[in-house]
Image: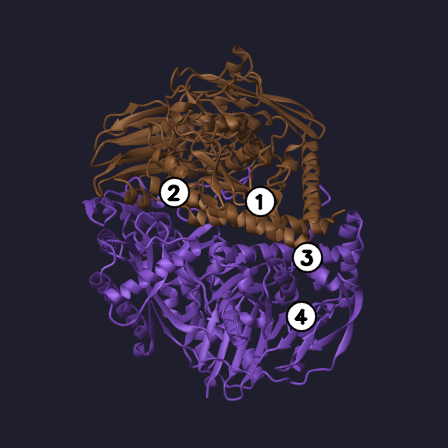
Amino acid sequence: MTVRVGVDTGGTFTDVVCYDASTGEVHTAKTPSTPSAFDRGVLAGMEAVLDRAGVAPDEVTFLSHGTTVGTNAVLEGDLPSLGLVTNAGLRDVLEIGDQTRPELYDLQCEKPPHLIPRRHRKGVPGRLDSAGEEVEPLDEDAVRTAVRELADAGVEAVVVSMLFAHLNDAHERRVEAIVEAEAPDLACARSSAVDPEPREYERTVTTVLNEAVKTRTAAYFARLQEGVAARGITAPLYVMHAGGGVFGVEEAIRHALRTVLSGPAAGAVAARDAAVRAGFERAIGLDMGGTSADVSLVEEGEVVRTTEGEIAGLPLSVPHLDVNTVGAGGGSVAWVDAGGGLRVGPDSAGADPGPICYDRGGDRPTVTDAQVVLGRVDPAAFRGDDPTGAAERARETFERELADPLGESVEAAALAVLRVADAKMARELRRVTVERGRDPAEFALVAFGGAGPLHAPDVADHADVGAVVVPRSPGVLSARGLLLADIRMDESAAYRGDGLAPGPVGDQFGALEAAVRDRLREGGFEAGAAELERTVDLRYRGQSYELRVPVDPGPVDDAALEAARERFHGRHARLYGHAMPDEPVEAVTLRVAGTIATPDIDPPAAAEGGSSRREREVYFQAGGWRSTPVVDRDALGPGDAVDGPTVVEDAGSTALVPPDAAGRVAESGAIVLER
Amino acid sequence: MVDSGELEIFRHALTSVVEEMGVTLQRTAYSTNIKIRRDHTCALFDADLRHVAQHDVAPQHVGSLVSVVPRVMRGRTELEPGDGVLVNDPYEGAVHLPDVMLISPLFVDEELVGYAANSAHHVDIGGPTPGGIPNDSTALYGEGLILPGVKAVREWDYDDELLELVLRNVREPAMRRGDFRAQLGANRIGERRYADLHERHGAEAVRERLDALLDYTERRVRAAIGELPDGTFAATDTMDGDGVEDEPVEIALAITVDGDEMTLDFTGTAEENEGPLNCTPAMAFAGAMAHVMALLGGELPKNDGFYRPFEFVTPAGTMVNPSRDRPVAAGWEVAMRAGELVTKAMAEAVPERTIAGTKGVVANVAYGGHDPRDDEPYVFYETVAGGYGARATKDGMDAVQAGFQNTANSPIEELETELPVYVRRYELIEDSAGAGRQRGGLGVRRDVEFYGERATFSLLADRATTRPWGLFGGRPGSAARYLVNPETDPVEVGSKSTTTLAPGEVGSVQTPGGGGYGDPLERDPGAVLADVRDGKVSVEAAAEEYGVVVEVGDADGAATVDEDATDLRRDAIRERRGRESSAAPDGTGAADG
């Protein structure tokens, strides 16, 4: 028998999901997060869900956790004091960045943080060339002096990042050895170990942030692991990483930066699952909450991955699911500008005080309030003391701040707020798909999060997306992703060699595969059970952006490489409109991912009863107010038709089937809407 | 009547069209300058040649498209679906020759509904100097290939013969071909998406919404101008020279705010130059509007409605409106300063919104030669960041682009892979920032050593003889320096020069620091100390400029402020200033430098 538990910590709430394979039941709980010591909230959430499920702690067989502790440390700038050793003359690379201003038309803007002050950045002589060959020996005396100065200055760790270290780590290793000799108490992080990929600024930022997050999260994970054990849970604690998988606590500390942005990754994994189970191999995941929305992409049944990300304006180079966060959610504030135009955002009422209808002191009209004004959401869903009064205040505020200045009815103003928010979201969806050379019309939209299912039909309409999928329990879908995540380890190395030859490619893949197996073994997994997946980043010689293509398992011979080359030409043609089969192709980075699959969840899709149909007055653009059926999600089973207009209420989330849409419940239990 | 919700929805849909064009262009371009440095922009125009949307990437390109598209396309009734016009002719409304624009008419049901246009900076456009920035021509003909608005595309394909002619005239033709193809792909996406928009709303409704959008923009811009105090605000600045006669020349701007309208008048600007330090009105407009837009509020929509409340005066025969076929390669340097004059002139009117002088220089650098590693010729172009001007409550940013310019740098590993060079220094310059209660941003030094074979090191820059101004008592930032062999045998070279370097020689670009804002004696001594500890301000400058006495200990981090000595020193400086100002007539205006 297996019981799986997933805990997803957000800034405000901790979502917990428990799946009991023996009964097929899924239990969920939502408890307050505890920012002063997040582990307390996590443990409380676990206790709550086990209690609800009637499961004893020692019956838990799989425990995974998504955390924002690392993310918050970066976003809030709560980072330890670090030192940097780099090439002479280049210590300011970290501060100059890409030399752009973050805003084009803002005279008051600021650059992203530079992480390590200039006084703690030391340049030392020693150079490699672009082939990784030494052209100037490392000045070891200079390194010693630099390390002693940094130690005297009281830094907590030393980061070493030198040009072309992704091709040859000799100089960085020497620096590491000198740090160990001169300052044995100081940790040392090498860019060649953390992020062996080209581009010095990105590599340096990534290495610095990894070390910083590591320092900030190690104690948290240690406390949590203790707390889990103390509660009698014997299953190992797994941690969600941005690559859409989980790894052990040791790994989570070593590759700390990979835990950053893991929240959206869990959502993307769950969205993929919902899409594939509803029969869609291509989908856009839209996780819309109170303050932001996460957009992910599924192609050929897999979540799209990347290694180029961003946090706080800083570039991250870590393997991760490609999730784009948009600063628009239910809390986005609507206003009328000086030209008489209706605007939504960028200001947000956030989660606290939140929209007016939360009844927690919010007094600005938001997107969520518009849903309440139009009768689409029951104000009681927000659990305020006086839902009716809050709804009335929302209506009055819409009248005063939006409807009157615009010369429209309250309903027309609220409807316009929703449509503007949806048009903005649609623009983001289009950008994300078009950037990958795809047309949104080829995709289904998987809508989840508290606000996603309400907006999805209109967003899909604006973005020309055909179908909308609303999975079960959309409010806690991200936590569900934690139960579905595979064990996954990623390793990469810069390719050393000319062109693309079986010998060196085979040797280097072999080394990477060995490294992945070692890591799995260290984590207590059976390395032989892992599925190893090879990919290579290729480009035409002379280009500077690469495309990632798979390399077949089995021997790395001419046929395997030719197949990879063919995939590259094909992908290039799709993305860029042309290929150049006669041009030489070169490899930049080799990658290996090892995964141990986590079994699927197969909860009952059948109707569980729920309450009978009700009716509520809901406002629509066509026809105005109309009495609309409201059904409980639990009352719907596979094959049921849900014709518009209908409001579907689920715990923590409401879905809308518009008047001109027809929905049906798929075998998986998700509602699929089509127009 | 289009309601305001519909209008905002339409605006997002329209922006989506230009964003998709921009993404396509960037994704498919070949040259580092376009795909990594993002030196390009896409825009949409309606059937009446009104600018309706832009992709916010590079303001200089938008400003030029706004001028060139109406001028080149007006009256061209012969165009058919799938046609495209290439233009880079400054005297047809374009800018300098490397910025090549492709304009495609858009049709729906055989009816002309608008134009998709994009502009991209090509790294080479022919002419004597690799990298498209000749610095000593005395006529446009010496600056490269001129494309006067020629029909180069039919049925969404380049005319082969014409394209071959173009490519035979430029260096690295394969790279250029890829970039031209990317420009075409972008417009094609524009066509498809603009047609979708018509299909969704209907042609009549699109026209109605466009009218409403432009009117709405105009209302918002007028409201923003209306918040500024009325009056005429003037400023001048001096540029290094034109690279040929090379005498300092003055640029002048008077801004008149009258209710909800604004006039920008460049009367008083020096006559056109013999050398390439001239800009077309389109460039001056692009440069000035980038600053006007930032000053009025960056979130204002940018389209034809924006420009309606403005009058723009560029007297003929001056260096902001040269006579036909004068050279203009350095025009963006003029436009950069034309833009800076906006924030300088408006300093007294809106002191809390404006900024002190920024680096004030585009700093175009080009390298050309032969790569011994693959036996191929190479050409590379980049620009170097510098200090940003200090603000009323914030220091200027260190090492950023300024004004209309926001192109990224080339990663060092990329540069060293592409070219036979070592980047020896890429660092902030100590003491380059103008002192102030808020200090300016630091300038940047980039030293590049060439190995293997000799190479050309070309500069098309400025600000070597004047300094970015401070405001309200803030001190000016440092001037730029352009040198060869800065460490071994330093030789200053002109801001517009080409030097042939032997293997092992180094070209060094050292950009200006930004001007300071407010009296440096009012700066928090703790902030000065932090800068001293970071090597951004020297101990000497801390004492001289800020009156802050820093005691340096032996170990790192041991520096401290001697507070008593600082009080004494600041008093002494104030006293000295008092004596000097009673001996000399008071300076005028807010700017200092």
Query: Label 2 crowding class (10 Å Cα cut-off): few <14, some 14-19, many 20+?
Result: some
Give the Cα separation between the discs numbered 3 and 1.
28 Å
Same chain for mark 2 and mark 1? The answer is yes
SS of the residue under disc 2:
helix
Can you identify the residue that label 2 sits on?
B177
Q: Relative to B464, does residue A528 appear above or below in the rendering?
A: below
Residue B106: image tag = 1
Comes first in the chain, label 2 or label 1 = 1
Q: Residue A312 at x, y = what percent?
A: 49, 52
The disc labelled 3 sits on which kind of residue? Answer: Arg
Task: Verify CB contact (< 8 Å) between mark 2 and mark 4.
Answer: no
Residue B405: image tag = none
| Chain that bears disc 3 | A
Give the Cα separation between the discs numbered 2 and 3.
42 Å
Same chain for mark 2 and mark 4? The answer is no
Q: Residue B452 at x, y = what percent?
A: 20, 37
Q: Relative to A525, does residue A352 appear above or below in the rendering?
A: above
SS of the residue under disc 4:
strand
- For discs 2 and 1, the disc positioned in front in the rendered view: 1
- For discs 1 and 4, the disc positioned in front in the rendered view: 1
Give the Cα separation between the discs numbered 1 and 4.
42 Å
- For discs 2 and 3, the disc positioned in front in the rendered view: 2
Can you identify the residue that label 4 sits on?
A654
